[in-house]
Amino acid sequence: MLAVALVGLAANAASLFMLRDAQRESLNMRGAYLEVMGDFAGSAAVIVAAILIALTGWTAADAVASALIALLILPRTFALLREATDVLLEATPRGIDMDHVRAHILDAPGVVDCHDLHAWTITSGMNVVSAHVILADGADAAATLDALGECLSDDFDIEHSTFQLETVDRRRVEARSHA
């Protein structure tokens, strides 16, 4: 029991080392990292239980170690589940204030209004925004798009955005489609 647990601990330690940076990249890698972390904790608990059983004969140490592992894994599991649910439901990313985003969009040069503004997370760390942006007559569309992209990137760490540029007279057509 002790020998197998020591081999498992070493293998899981190596895996944790390899996944330490990758787990920040995506939900899948975070899930893999948490799985290996659970296995690492399991190996450590089995080592402690094996030593206790060898020294004292108390065989219940194995069951206690298993319960402890489960209690350590649960909080991380719920956090991962919450994040996965937010991605699947296309929820507004935590920490993004949509009123603040709207205000920044309205401050861009040439923008007179904004509607159908949405933000969601495609995968861990990749938030996106889409919006219909109404331009003032004579506004430079390319300059406005550059300003909008720069604003969202700099102020909200949103690197991917989609804007439908519209003219003021288009607003009435949009209003009919949303009635």
Image (spheres, rainbow, N blue to C red):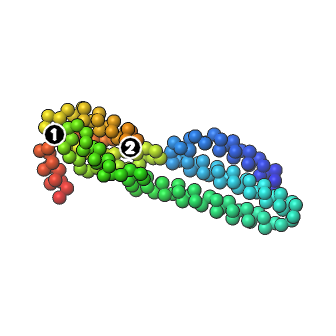
Q: Is residue 171 left or right of residue 152?
A: left
- In the rendered image, which quarter is residue 136 located in? top left
**Mark 2 surroundings within 10 Å by alpha-carbon count, few (fewer than 14), some (14 through 19), many (20 or more):** some
Local secondary structure at mark 1 = loop
Q: State the quadrant of the N terminus.
A: bottom right
Residue 90 appearing in the image: no
Asked if residue 130 lies left or right of residue 62, the reply is left
Residue type pointed to by label 1: Ala
Q: Which residue is mark 2?
A: 156
- Kind of residue at disc 2: Phe
User: Looking at the image, which is closer to me, 149 or 38?
Assistant: 149
Q: Quadrant of the C terminus?
A: bottom left
Q: Is residue 150 above or below residue 106?
A: above
The image quarter containing residue 147 is top left
Image position, residue 45 (x, y; %): 74, 57
Q: Dot 1 surroundings within 10 Å: few (below 14), some, or many (20 or more)?
A: some
Tag 2 and tag 1, C-beta contact below 8 Å: no
- Separation (CA) of disc 2 from disc 1: 25 Å
Q: Earlier in the sequence, mark 2 or mark 1?
A: 1
- Horizontal and vertical percent for residue 53? 84, 62
Q: Residue at x 21, y 41 (%)?
A: 111
Residue at 32% over, 49% down = 100
Q: Write the residue at 28% across / 48% down.
A: 102
Expressed as whole percent of the image width and height from the top left, the position of residue 18 reads: 63, 40
Q: What number is the disc on residue 136?
A: 1
- For the residue pair 143 and 16, the one nearer the viewer reads as 143
